[in-house]
Image (spheres, rainbow, N blue to C red):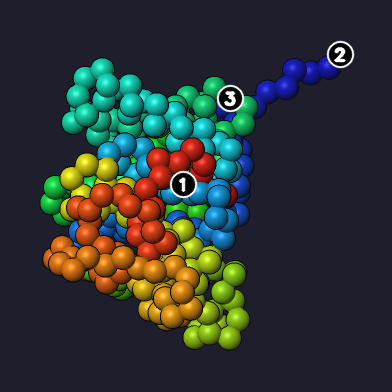
Amino acid sequence: MTMPYYASAEQVMRDRSEYARKGISRGRSVAVLTYADGVLLIAENPSSTLHKLGEIYDRIGFAAVGRYSEFESLRVAGVRLADVRGYSYNRRDVTGRIVANAYAQTLGAIFTEQMKPYEVELCVAEVGDTPERDQLYRLTFDGSVVDEPNFVVMGGQAEAVTGHLRENFHVGMGLADALKVGIDALSAVSPATAGTGQGGHTRLNAEQLEVAVLDRRRPKRAFRRVIGAALHALLGDGQAAREASEGGTHAHTPSHPAPGTPAGLGDPAAPDTAGGAEYELRHDEDGGEG
């Protein structure tokens, strides 16, 4: 006669937690930082089509690490939740806290009720009218949600990246400075940069990065991807100038850009005219590889 299998609830939860953490730790890190004009999202992601960063609603962004298929399904569900709530009530009724709570309930139910937990960590970011009203919510695989100040780091060697940001991040940085601090923190632990650089690591380049912002200066949809010559200009690698001299991607800079607008990014209040040096407007239906 075979004996029935038994494991305590504590042991089952411990095993599920260990399984999820192992899966998440294999992913490359993502950092979300506040800066003077909004929220900056940075991911180490060489893929140009599978995104780790995305838009949920007008002023709400999404970042994730882990298993792509799982966090992409969560991103799409968040978009649908926000669209239905905004249509049924008012667009102002869609907040980052509501989306984060919905994700927390979903992840918590999956963790406790299903054999396999989701191998994901999420960040829901909402840009406010002032820096004091910016909100960053970090969600873990078991449905825990935490309101983080200033920055959030997920995946890979999150503790090491967080330690680097604590030493170098300060409130009120401009976009270029915040991007530099974030990239330096990710580069310090990335296996892709291990080599002959300072401290044994080189710096991540534009082809290895996915960058987006939630720009509070834009009146409606705040999410923009930073790509092409605009990203090169912020990184200061000289690629934008080379592209312009070769007749490649040209930056469209208005004659009177808005105050605080980095060179090459154009007017944040201007229409969404696509250009390689502009922010790319995409309410995309693709996500990012863990």
Give the label, 1 or 2, closer to the camera. 1
Q: Badge 3: few (under 14), some or many (20 or more) residues near its Cα, within 10 Å?
A: few
Of all residues shown, which one is farthest toward the top?
Answer: 1
- Which of the numbered marks, if any, corresponds to residue 114? 3
Q: In percent of the image, x 18 and y 31: which residue is there?
A: 92
Query: Is 219 displayed left or right of 78 in the figure?
Result: left
Percent x, y for residue 272? 31, 49
In the rendered image, the vertical position of residue 110 relative to residue 125, given as above or below? above
Q: Earlier in the sequence, mark 1 or mark 2?
A: 2
- The quadrant in which the N terminus is found is top right
Q: Amino acid at mark 3?
A: Gln
In the rendered image, the vertical position of residue 154 relative to residue 261, given as above or below? above
- Which of the numbered marks, if any, corresponds to residue 130? none
Mark 3 to mark 2: distance in Å?
A: 28 Å
Give the label, 3 or 1, closer to the camera. 1
Residue under label 2: 1
Percent x, y for residue 276? 42, 61
Q: Amino acid at mark 2?
A: Met
